[in-house]
Image (cartoon, rainbow, N blue to C red):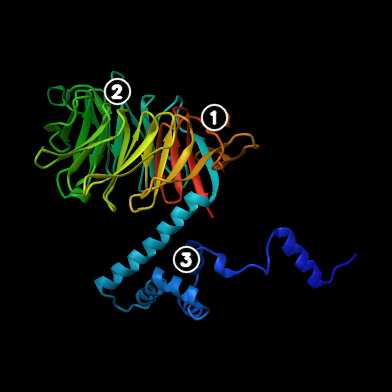
Amino acid sequence: MEHGPSGGSTAMRRRSGLRGGTRMEWLEHDILCIIFSFLDFFDLVRCTAVCKSWNAVIRKSELLQVLYFKLRRDSGESTSSGQRKSMEFGLQEVAMKYHRLCLQRGRIDIHQWKAHSVGVDQCRMKMGLLLTGVGDKVMRLWSLDSYKCEEEYYIPDTASVVDFDFDESKIVGLLGSRVGIWTRNGKRSIFPSREGTFSKGLCVRYENAHFMYIDPDAVIGCEDGTARVFDMYSQTCSRIIKMHAGPVTCLALSDDELILSGSSLGSVSISDLASDQRVARLRSTDSAGIRTLCFNPCSHLVFAGTTVGYTYCWDLRTMKSLWETRISSNVLYSLSHLRSDNSTLAVGGIDGVLRVLNQNTGEVLSRCFIDDERPISSTRNMHAFIEKKKGIRLPEDAEVDRIPRTCRPPITCLSVGMKKVVTAHNSKYIRMWKFNM
């Protein structure tokens, strides 16, 4: 039997579970913001007259102001510093909302390439560059746009890298009980033994003068519970700060000269870099060791992951706990967020699941793993052989242990960029998770 246009349309709506067609009111606020952000100024003005809900969304998101100031800038009209800041803030807010939406719900494409000849377990991402290493005798700096290895930094035969950090001009590496510096032109310097020798180092973080307006310092977390501060210019240890009774397992630095350190004894200690005095101690409710730590300078929130799968959040302004949640039964190796993002936190650990958490509540927004069963597509450019896989989001009621281990190799380190997360797995391969709507 043939159906007329009306009957066919009704049948289609019934099969799809819709009644009365699709309504724009069903679209969420973030999705509308993304749609509106692609419009020009005059089309956006027209959209404000469509209905009250659209008018409210556009007004609240400040898209009109952003586009107006952009038009003035492009036409050569001068704008005040306040107008420019409002425009930049509006653009950043839209970008952060899109980033959050992609991590929470977007399609996942995973690109992996062979970065080293042996397994490596550390990665750092800054300024569109990725530094990988720890496991062999070389650190490599990669372009994330082309997957090209831009530079290589070789380790002395008598030393091994424990941890590293970098900025636009140099790489700072922790070599057991010494500190090494590699400049971007390839020159290497190892601190003299009379100044550089110290109790076994476990982690390093480096702050550049461009952000702190002081001489750049490298902070080393040591096995004896101290944090040792090294001046990069004089290549000397300028301060020794007692942080914990047990080993310092992880570090984070704030823009206002605070050192935050995690301990194997289960606490986070905060000290002032200027006065060498302890400011506060943040305690977890269990005695498990703190394995990873990060600090959000925009929201003043401190995040920590433990050896038994708990994540904690404290507000540095009040020194009080905001939330705690157990997201895994195993150790969490790494957690990170985009510097200007106040909403999402990426967490990885031994169970190999990439989790995205709400920074403000600790709610698990998404759990992702590699679809290792589908055929792998691959491409070769002039720099690398790239294998492409799909990422899968795990349903809320699904058990992690039922997922094959080949689909979830342990995540030993991760770093977050705009709509992407880079992971290391103590293997030869580095993976970049790309999230797109």
Please tell me which residue is depicted at 45% across the width and 70% down the height of the picture. 57
Label 2: which secondary element: loop
Label 3: which secondary element: helix
> Around disc 2, counting alpha carbons within 10 Å, would you say few (fewer than 14), some (14 to 19), or many (20 or more)?
some
Q: Give whichever of 118, 93 is nearer the camera.
A: 93
Q: Determine the CA span between mark 2 and mark 3.
A: 52 Å
Query: Can see residue 103?
Result: yes
Q: Position of residue 82 (x, y in %)?
A: 26, 71
Please tell me which residue is depicted at 23% across the width and 22% down the height of the picture. 200
Give amino acid for label 3: Cys
**CB atoms at circles 1 and 3 under 8 Å apart?**
no
N-terminal of the two: label 2 or label 1?
2
Please tell me which residue is depicted at 24% across the width and 30% down the height of the picture. 180
Q: In which quarter of the image is residue 5?
A: bottom right
Q: Which residue lies furthest to the front in this view?
A: 285
> Around disc 1, counting alpha carbons within 10 Å, would you say few (fewer than 14), some (14 to 19), or many (20 or more)?
few
- Which numbered tag is attached to residue 156? 2
Q: Which of marks 2 and 3 is in front?
A: 3
Q: Give whichever of 76, 202 is nearer the camera.
A: 202
* Left-right relation of 221 to 371: left
Q: Name the residue under label 1.
A: 401
Q: Position of residue 339 (x, y in %)?
A: 33, 50
Q: Determine the CA span between mark 1 and mark 3.
A: 38 Å
Give amino acid for label 2: Pro
Q: Nearer the viewer, mark 1 or mark 3?
A: 1
* Left-right relation of 272 to 24: left
Q: Determine the CA span between mark 2 and mark 1.
A: 41 Å
Q: Mark 3 points at which residue?
A: 33
In which quadrant is the C terminus drawn? bottom right
